[in-house]
Every structure is written in structure tokens, then in C-alpha cells.
Amino acid sequence: SESKFEICQEIIDHDERAAHKDHNDIKISAPGYDILQNITTQINGYDPLSVADANSPERFIPILEARGLNDNDKDEFGHRRDTLPIAQAVADHQNDHPHLHAQSAVLQFLEEEDGMNEEAVRSNAALYQFLKKTAQGIIVRNNPGTLSATSQKRCDDMLRDLSDDGLMIMTHPDVSSTLGAKDSLVKIKDLKCGLKDTEVYYTPEDFGEGFRQSIALHPRVIKQNRGSQGEGVWIVQLEDQSAYCSAQGECPPVTDDTRIVLMEAWDNHVEHHTVGEFLEFCINGRIDKSGSWTSTGQGRYFDGGLEAGSMVVDQRFLPRITEGEVRCLFVGSELVEIVHKKPKEGGLSATLASGAIYTKYSPYDEKFATLVQHLKEDVPRIMASFDMAHRPLPLLWTADYIYGDTDDELYVGEINCSCPGITQQLGIVPVIAKVAFETVFHSDLVSVGSVDDVAAQ
């Protein structure tokens, strides 16, 4: 089998996505074989490197991880703690569909260190060529922040190219970035789960004008697009609670001298500022005009422009956030778990870091019957809301809901499909395998199902 592998002895261009297309001309040789061995973990003794042939009868759905400069999410064996159970479930699901001859393994994309790590460059080039030849689908388990921004782009571009080559990427990087962006809340505001009083600002000028108007009407939640665990998510209220205007559309905007009270969702700390200082912090960061801040964040939420994903979302504050968030965990379109995340007494943040208490519920619990019914209406429409009806739902994703005025009103505050961890929900890995098979081998399963139906009759 080594005669099928040969790798070019040249440095790959790192600046253009087209560089991955150049990998079509790279053939994997013995050196490439060695490199791939270093990033491959076998499942059930199956060695995918011994079958690097597009004509092989074996079907292949590997798990793709990243090995980077920040591997805090890995165990002592160098894998995410939920990766091997997922890979094992995919391999075991073959028993339900023996005609597919499907196998799995774990492979890793390596940090390239801006092109300085030549071995990583060669490994990733070989990985692209190998996956193109052997895989039908890929389950991506790459935690944001594992790779540098440059290497993450290289990995995402590789996955885009593999998708163009006909592979099913679960979850495609464009789906992850689009659904995970804060402006997703604007795109779904007409669904059952959407809050209509939601706006997005892509420029500092629009933010300044829009926020001065919106805060005059209601308390707000202002969310930067970057950050995690509530960093840069602010609950904003007028210091003078009697100053809110009740006439929608007829209220004058507040002035920059208006005093406001802010609580950051990251740690529930409270700050007092003027509207002008808050706008300066969000736009320009820690400067004289923004005053003194105790937040650990740096502000500057529009740095890099829209091209860098910079934006701010402005939503009406829902007071029942004090009762917590309701997280729905999905595998494709299947709701597999509901978690109520109740904030620490006196707080608003529902993160574990802030002391929130998590309680799990079955998707069939009567407590959330209305929510589940609304989900049945919303989920089939979600991808079309993002102009992505041609792509499947993320393989593994979460939606965090906040209570409205009644127990039957819940609105999405955030969607996450980048790489939700499931170390506490490993019982769902058979569902992940089932949905992955249905996504990748849909036509095969439908045709076999038809034959089985005829035989049964």
C-alpha cells in the first residue's frame, strides 16, 4: 500500500484558500504515510491508512479533531473526552447497516504556526488528499481556540474544499459561523423561538443611533459577537427607572449624559456609567472618554469590521432571566435533552462559572410540552432562515431559551454549534451515529429500506 503514497517536497502557499486545491496534485508517499500514522487513532482495529483507495468497498466516517497550541480540552491520550465514544458509536452503528461496510477512526488537523511548522504543513496536506480519497463524511470536533486564527482558517478552508469535493461535513464551518453568530437572533426573530424586539448593528454609527433609541424604551441586553461564557454580554437599564418612554416609535433618544446601570453576564458584576461612556467602551475600548471599568473585557466590539465577524446585537431584556435559561440539546433535528440553568441567588448569569445550578429534563417532560411543540414547528424552518436550506442542520447543537411573560413563552438567546461538549451526555452517542449515517448515506438507506419493505410484504 505504501506505493500509493507520495508527497511533494514543497512548501504549501498559506495565504490563499486555493492552496488546498493544490493538494489535488499532491500524492501521498511513505513520508506522508508516517505523518498520517502520527495523527490517526484506530477504532475496532480498523486501519484506514491501509485502504487509501477511492474504489475500496469500505465506507468511512472519521472524526476530525485539532491538535494545537491550546489543548486544554484534551485528555492524557491527546483526544477530546467525548471524541472516542462518538467514533466508537459510529463504528458500532455499522452493525445496524452491514451492507454499508462503514468504518471510523480519529484524525487530527495540526497547528501550522503560521507556516513555520513544516511537518504540520505536510501532514495537513496529506490529510486533505487522504480524506478526499477515502471518506464520505466527516464529523468535526474542533473546539474554538484550539488552533491559531490562521490555522483555524486553513482547517475551515480544507473542510470547505472537501465539501465541494462531495464529502458531507458535519458540521460545515459556514453553518457553525452563521448559526453561532449573534445576528442569528435577528434572522430567527419571526420564528416561534424568536424575539421580535431584536436588532443587530454592524457599524459603530448604527450602534450609537440604535442603542440611544432602544434604551429609551426598555431595558436591553447588548451582546458582542465574540467572547464566550457571557463575556461582553451586558444587561443595561436606566438608572432612573421612571424615565422609560411608553410610546413605541414616538420616544426621543436618550442623551450621552444619561446614567445607566450595567451587569455583565460573565460574573454578574455591576457597573455604573453614562450612555456615552458605554458606547465609547464598546466601540473604542478603555480610553479616557469611556471612564474606568472593572470588567475583565477590553470592549472594542467592532474591531476588524464585519469581515472579522464584528457586530453587536441589541435585544429587549426579559426580566425572567432571573429564573434561568432552558438549554435544548439537539442531534440534527432530534431533541435529546433539556437543561434548566438557574442562576445563583441574586444573579442573572446562567454560566457554571457564576455559580448557576443545572437540572436535566427529558424531552418528553410535561413541564416543557409547549416548548417542544414550538420546536417541531421551528426546527424544519431554521436553516431556511439563514438562507442555508441546502445544508443539513448541525450534527450537534444547542439553543438557549429565556422565559418571556408566561411559562409557555420562551425565546432563543443563543445558538451554539461550534463544538458543544457532551462528556456528561455520553448516552446520546448512538443517536449521533444514527443521525450521521442518515445524513451521509441517506440515499443508500432509503433504497435498502425500500427493498426491505418489499421483502417484508
Image: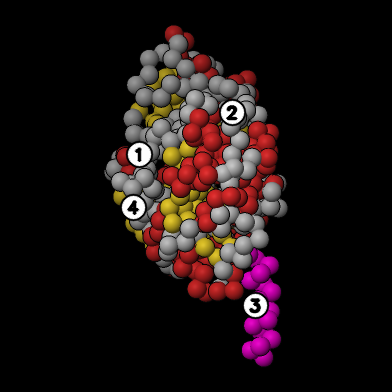
Query: Pointer 1 and pointer 3: residues touching (CB < 8 Å)?
Result: no
Residue occupied by mark 2: 11
Label 1, residues with CA under 10 Å away: few <14, some 14-19, many ≥20: few
Q: Which element type, helix, strand or loop, lies under badge 4?
A: strand
x and y, in percent, of residue 241 in the image: 44, 30
x and y, in percent, of residue 420 in the image: 45, 49
Label 2, residues with CA under 10 Å away: few <14, some 14-19, many ≥20: few
* N-terminal label among 1 and 2: 2
* N-terminal label among 2 and 4: 2
Q: Vertical placement of 29 versus 310: above or below?
A: below
Residue occupied by mark 3: 449
Query: Which residue extends farthest top?
Result: 288
Which of these two is toward me, 367 or 356? 356
Q: CA distance from mark 1 to mark 2?
A: 30 Å
Q: What range of the chain is rendered magenta? A: 441-457
Q: CA distance from mark 4 to mark 3?
A: 41 Å
Q: Is residue 29 left or right of residue 236?
A: right
Q: Which element type, helix, strand or loop, lies under badge 3?
A: helix
x and y, in percent, of residue 23 in the image: 64, 39
x and y, in percent, of residue 332 in the image: 56, 58
Q: CA distance from mark 1 to mark 4?
A: 23 Å
Quarter containing the C terminus: bottom right
Q: Amino acid at mark 1?
A: Asn
Which of these two is toward me, 362 or 28? 28
Residue occupied by mark 4: 358
Label 4, residues with CA under 10 Å away: few <14, some 14-19, many ≥20: some
Query: Pointer 2 and pointer 3: residues touching (CB < 8 Å)?
Result: no
* N-terminal label among 2 and 3: 2
Q: Residue at x 36, y 45 (%)?
A: 78
Q: Amino acid at mark 2?
A: Ile
Residue occupied by mark 1: 72
